[in-house]
Amino acid sequence: MWRGLYTAASGVITETTRTAVIANNLANVNTTGYKRDRALDREFEPMLIRRINDTESMKVTDFKGFSLDRRAPIVGTLGLGSYTQEIATDHAQGAMMTTGNPYDLAISGEGYFMVETPDGVRYTRNGSFYRAANGNLVTSEGRNVLNAQGRPINIPETATGVVVHHQQGDIYADGQLVGTLGFVQFNDRRAVLKQGDSLYYAQEGARPQPATGIVEQGVLERANSNVVNEMVDLINNYRVYEADSKSVTTQDTLLDHAVNEVGRLT
């Protein structure tokens, strides 16, 4: 009974985590460059169950004193619950939204923009940039957007026209080159993990390489999560959670009867 209670509880915990992931996807459906997450579950190693003290069944394999198999017959396997193995990010391309703002940049294909943070260089797909008071190109949170050499990009105050080359990421202000975007990618998408605020950090040993994607100006990449799909997943997840909750209640009731009623009779 204790095992049944723990097995049911593990399902509740797993579905709670999945609900949190889906809710986060819904909350960020309008976040520029957001990539949806998925909770990947795994089952604990099941237990092999055999019948014990079943001598009659064991005689079936006996013939003239020779036994084919003296082990107890197998009943089957018993599941021991599940757990969340990983929160995986879906890096599929999001839809493009035209804004007409020359400082809005989107990546079509592979790549990340480099951003300066107190924790070091971070990477983002959110290209909602603007020119700060000091002339630096910054993110919507005020972090410096870095060039290919890892330094801030400064745009002259007198600049009346800003053009971004869609392949190299070169930025021209009134026809003069003022910098080249730090535009990189990683061979393995698992090399970068989410940090928050649309930022990613590279895992130890991961090395950025020149990106193969294209930078589009006056465009933003929308989140790749879909409200309808996420709501369907949330409803299905709620049904599974409800079933797991009833299992916990049932196991608790059986345990209560075993302790208070069966135990009293013996």
Image: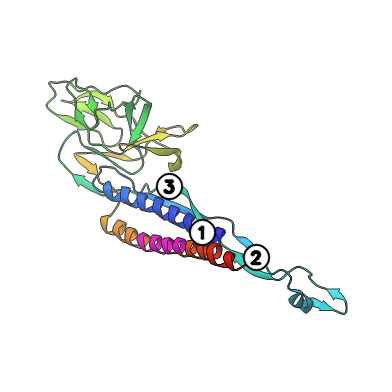
> Which label lies toward us, 3 or 2?
2
Q: Residues within 10 Å of mark 3 (few under 14, many from 20)?
A: some
Q: Quadrant of residue 258?
A: bottom right
Could you classify mark 2 by the number of other residues whose Cα lies within 10 Å: few (under 14), some (14-19), or many (20 or more)?
A: few
Residue at (19%, 33%) from the top-left corner? 103
**What whole-number distance in Å separates the C-alpha atoms at marks 3 and 2?**
32 Å
User: Residue 245 occupies which quadrant of the picture?
Assistant: bottom left
Q: Answer with left or right where residue 75 lies relative to residue 242.
A: right
Q: Which residues are magenta?
A: 238-249
Q: Amino acid at mark 1?
A: Leu
- Say above or below: 66 vs 82: below
In the picture, the disc for residue 5 is 1
The label number, if any, that marks residue 49 in the structure image: 2
Residue of label 3 = 87
Taking the spot 65% from the left edge, 65% from the top edge, the residue there is 49
Total marks placed: 3
Q: Is residue 244 magenta?
A: yes
SS at circle 3? strand
Label 3 to label 1: alpha-carbon separation: 25 Å
Residue positioned 28% across, 22% down in the render: 152
